[in-house]
Amino acid sequence: MKVSLRQVNDGISVIDLEGDFDLYSSPKAREVLLQLAKDKVPAVIVNLDKVGYMDSSGIATLIEALRALDKHGGRLILAGLNAKTMEVIKLARLEKVFEIRDNEEQAIASLKS
Amino acid sequence: MVRVISAIGRYGINLVQELGRMGLFFYYSFLGIFKPPGKFFSTIKQVHFIGNKSMAVVSFTAAFSGMVLGLQGYYTLSKFGSEGLLGSAVALSLIRELGPVLTALMVTGRAGSAICAEIGIMRIEEQIEALECMAIDPYSYIIAPKVLGCIIAVPLLTAIFDIVGMLGGYGVGVGLMGVNPGAFIWGMKNSVLNQDVWMGVVKSFFFAVLIIWICCYKGFWAGTRRGSFGAEGVSKATTEAVVLSSVMVLVCDYIITSLML
Amino acid sequence: MKDPGNMPNVESSPLIRVENIVAHYDSLEVLHNLTFDVTPRAITVIMGVSGCGKSTLLKLLIGLKKPTSGNIYVDGKNLVKMSRKELDTFRKRIGVLFQGGALFNSMTVGENIAVPLRVHTKLSEETIRIMCQLKLEMVGLAGFEDFMPSQLSGGMRKRAGLARALAMDPEILFFDEPSSGLDPITSAGLDNLILKLKSAFGMTIVVVTHELESAFTIADQLIVMDKGEILAYGTPEEVKKSTNQRVRQFLERQPEEKYSKDSQFLESLLSKA
């Protein structure tokens, strides 16, 4: 899985993930997310629109990132989930725990408000 | 008549099969040492289990063995007026023979039987099959740390046995029977040579391998043979393991002694 | 755990195909030329009396025993001819729940679930901890990660074993007599859990059992075995309509009747006197 990081206006970090978010690729994403939390970044958007498959290690990584960011009041928004990855979130009963938006633009919009 | 011959034949075939299985077990366990996952923490846990938990038994046995050696040695040596040699007698007996052998027997009874039963229960509860179905090699995950732990713990326990035994012998010889302390210690220092210590080390190493090999093997295949399933199989396996280990330690002792003397 | 959203499509190509397998224990033939398919994303139940060979069949499907002859194809690859490495890869895609749960007694429930994750992946301790919590939540044992197996009831041990089997998000789950040792209520709870795993996660599930009620509750496909042969094979409705005498006997829970008349029984007693 490819993990790329970029900045958009106002110090919002966007992580683009491409490929399968599974047992073997999660550590990569985890490293990047936890570093952002350490740097006390105010908001992170995780762009999942190029992620075809996410398993429970992916969810665990996102949960850990959410908690880490929450410590300094940072926000985590998941964007671009397709039907399958949304299903995985719902099955873990986490759809109310995460902030979820349809795409990156909506995520940025909700951060501005 | 024919029945007798076929019984002997069957016994022979079973024996060869058993030896073959044990050989394969040794081979897979050896390979398992070098396979992932990492062995560091699991080995330390096993060293604690085998070494730490056998300490009390070993120390106790050592003290009394040493004391008995002191008594018997004094009694025999005094007939020749050679009480001064008691130190040598006690030290050499312990370091070359009693230390390795008695430690091995104590560890077999204390830790060997426990390990055999532990693995046997894993087998009858299908935990070993569960490991295989998770693509985890049971030889690597379960057996190898025990092998490494035993090889580290038993020689160390043997050393402790030797020292406690010598203290016991000193206590009885000098304290009780009145042997000159200087003579006792001097005798020890003079007659114990490198090759004696080396013999003790080599023996304890081989005994360690023997004990853990037999006990793990018996436990691993507990309850899978006809006529002894379930819990009965585990208890049978444990008994067989302790008996076989003890006997083989003594046999091996003779072989190593004759080779190294 | 791929493709969770689709309804089980019984028409799609089988995930596991068993062809003409024969199995022996020493010289005794216990499975006689079996052929069947396991449909993906559906529950296949293998049913029969004790000793019919269903446990042996399960061992063959998970690679713990090799058939004397025949083939078992998983996604096109022959399980019988797999190398050690290929077998390991296959086993990382499956989860097996053994009778009794087969939990490791010296570890807590959480540590049990973590075992495959710690051995096969480089996930961090925190990630593993959260995953264990997720799995326990899935099987209805939330909060039990620090309990030792000996502190759990039989039903809870099975659920914990199931959580461990689910640790690596397997595509195929195998259950060996899931209802054994459970009371009817706990057993029904486990049945519901199995149904949920199929519908919510799209898992392919193979269950070996002798419990009629459980089997008919959960099965999409039923295989009835006796004395090492398949007597009936199809949907539960089709099997219910079977006219095979031994199948009817099994379904109607009739014990083996050696003598159909009382007079015959008395005769047999007297002849032995």
Image (tube, coloured by chain):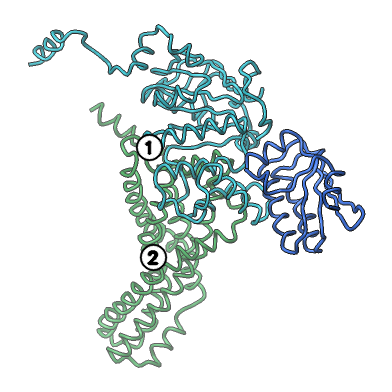
Chain colours: A blue, B green, C cyan
Residue type (three-letter) at the residue carrying disc 1: Leu
Give the farthest residue toward the top: C243
* Residue B214 shows in the view: no
Position of the C terminus of chain C by quadrant? top left
The residue drawn where x is 47% and y is 59% is B206
- State the image coordinates of residue B97 (x, y, percent, origin top left): 39, 69
Secondary structure of the residue carrying tag 2 is helix
Label 2 marks which chain's residue?
Answer: B
Q: Which numbered tag is attached to residue C138?
A: none
Q: Residues within 10 Å of mark 1 (few under 14, many from 20)?
A: some
Pointer 2: what residue? B101
User: Are discs 2 and 1 located on one and the same chain?
Assistant: no
> Is residue B148 placed above or below B65 in the rendered structure?
above
Observer-nearest of A83 and A64: A83
Q: Residues within 10 Å of mark 2 (few under 14, many from 20)?
A: many
Give the farthest residue toward the right: A9
Give the farthest residue toward the front: A113
The residue drawn where x is 32% and y is 46% is B236
Position of the N terminus of chain C by quadrant? top right
Secondary structure of the residue carrying tag 1 is loop
The residue drawn where x is 46% and y is 84% is B190
User: Left or right: C183 with respect to A100?
Assistant: left
Residue type (three-letter) at the residue carrying disc 2: Val
Q: Which numbered tag is attached to residue C182?
A: 1
